[in-house]
Image (cartoon, helix red, strand yellow):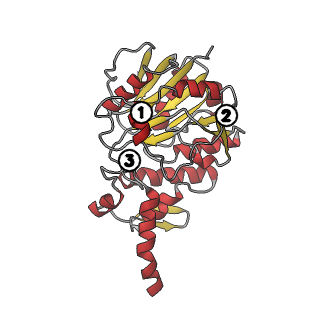
């Protein structure tokens, strides 16, 4: 018999994405015991009826409080086994069962598969065979292991998009650090905290989620100020900055300068910056590596001539 699993998510806007997540969970081969939502807006979502309870906890609108919303969902969860999904995720019908089976094999943090869907992929409804054929793996993320679980030895690979762990371990860590406000840094901080506490990380074969398309920028110039603030927060806590590749890209773009241990914005974000980093409708995901490679290629001849 399977152990009860609480699925935790968080959301602000993107109501159609959340409805797809809920409807997919309702088609799970093994049902979750509940869905708990940290709602980062003033009103709860209007959601379809499900064979499991849905509990929404409204935190209100204002600042983007991803850490606080995840923490609230975990604290309110009724069961020991937690699965965390972002609002953009459509869980495969086997996701809950896969995590349940894998959590019998290892403690620590389990990170499931993610395939990215292009724009329009969900227009015809939830078709998991269609999603499996259409979805692509992110080029900057590790692929699934050949075995049910594969060891991950670098805490910087932790990814809150789709993961599972025991509630007691989550609470023992103190959850996500709520000093990280806005976008960036809280995942790496949580990974570092977990690693310092001796938790292990595992890539998971299966436990697949399909990431729904939404317009995005990588590196996230639309969140530049919070990225800088959170990079400094991480530095003050751990002794070095994180999000190095984003900071490097912002520097090459002329948006940021490094002053000692600080990264300082030196100009406003322009349309050209947004155009460079914007995810196109034919792309299932935006790529920081692609933009950084372009910037480094453009800079190399100028450096050679200097």
For the residues labelled 2 and 1, the Cα–Cα distance comes to 31 Å
- What residue would you read off at disc 2? 108
Task: Give the percent coordinates (x, y) of residue 140.
Answer: 51, 53
**Residue 197 in the image, given as x and y percentages of width and height:** 70, 39
Q: Secondary structure at mark 2?
A: loop
x 61%, y 43%: residue: 191
Which of the numbered marks, if any, corresponds to residue 129?
1
- Please report contact status of discs 3 and 2: CB closer than 8 Å, yes or no: no
Please say if 62 is above or below 95.
Answer: below
Q: Residues within 10 Å of mark 1 (few under 14, many from 20)?
A: few
Residue at the bottom extreme, as displayed: 305
**Whether label 2 touches label 1, CB < 8 Å:** no
Numbered disc 3: secondary structure: loop
Residue, x 35% and y 51% (percent of image)? 283
Q: Is residue 140 visible?
A: yes
Where 146 falls versus 55 (above or below)? below
Q: Do tag 3 and tag 1 residues touch (Cβ < 8 Å)? A: no
Quadrant (top left, top right, bottom left, bottom right) of the N terminus: top right
Q: Is residue 49 left or right of residue 9?
A: left
Q: Which residue is mark 3?
A: 284
- First reached walking from the N terminus: tag 2 or tag 1: 2
Left or right of residue 107: residue 283: left
* Residue 75 position by quadrant: top right
Q: Earlier in the sequence, mark 3 or mark 2?
A: 2
Q: Nearer the viewer, mark 2 or mark 1?
A: 1
Considering only order in the chain, which callout, 1 or 3, is on the residue closer to the N terminus? 1
* Kind of element beneath mark 1: helix
């Amino acid at each position: 018999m399977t152990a009860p699993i609480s699925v935790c998510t968080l959301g602000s806007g993107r109501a159609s994405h959340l409805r797809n997540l809920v409807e997919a969970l309702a088609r799970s081969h093994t049902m979750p015991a509940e869905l708990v939502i940290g709602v980062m807006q003033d009103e709860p979502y209007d959601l379809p009826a499900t064979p499991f309870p849905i509990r929404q906890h409204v935190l209100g609108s204002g600042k983007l409080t991803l850490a606080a919303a995840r923490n609230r969902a975990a604290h309110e969860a009724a069961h020991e086994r937690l699965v965390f999904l972002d609002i953009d995720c459509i869980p495969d019908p086997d996701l809950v069962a896969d995590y349940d089976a894998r959590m019998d094999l290892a403690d620590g943090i389990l990170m499931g598969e993610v395939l990215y869907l292009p724009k329009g992929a969900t227009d015809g409804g939830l078709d998991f065979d269609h999603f499996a054929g259409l979805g692509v793996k992110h080029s900057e993320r590790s692929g699934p292991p050949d075995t049910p679980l594969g060891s991950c030895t670098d805490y910087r690979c932790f990814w809150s998009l789709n993961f599972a762990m025991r509630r007691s371990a989550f609470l023992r860590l103190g959850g996500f650090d709520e000093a990280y406000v806005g976008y960036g840094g809280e995942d790496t901080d949580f990974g570092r905290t977990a690693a310092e506490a001796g938790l292990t990380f595992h890539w998971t074969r299966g436990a697949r989620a399909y990431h729904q398309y939404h317009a995005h920028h990588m590196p996230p110039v639309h969140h530049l100020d919070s990225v800088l603030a959170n990079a400094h927060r991480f530095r003050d806590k751990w002794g070095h900055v994180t999000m190095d590749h984003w900071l490097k890209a912002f520097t090459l773009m002329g948006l940021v300068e490094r002053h000692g241990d600080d990264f300082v914005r030196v100009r406003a974000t322009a349309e050209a910056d947004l155009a460079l980093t914007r995810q196109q409708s034919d792309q299932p995901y935006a790529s920081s590596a692609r933009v950084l490679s372009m910037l480094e290629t453009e800079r190399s001849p100028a450096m050679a001539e200097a």
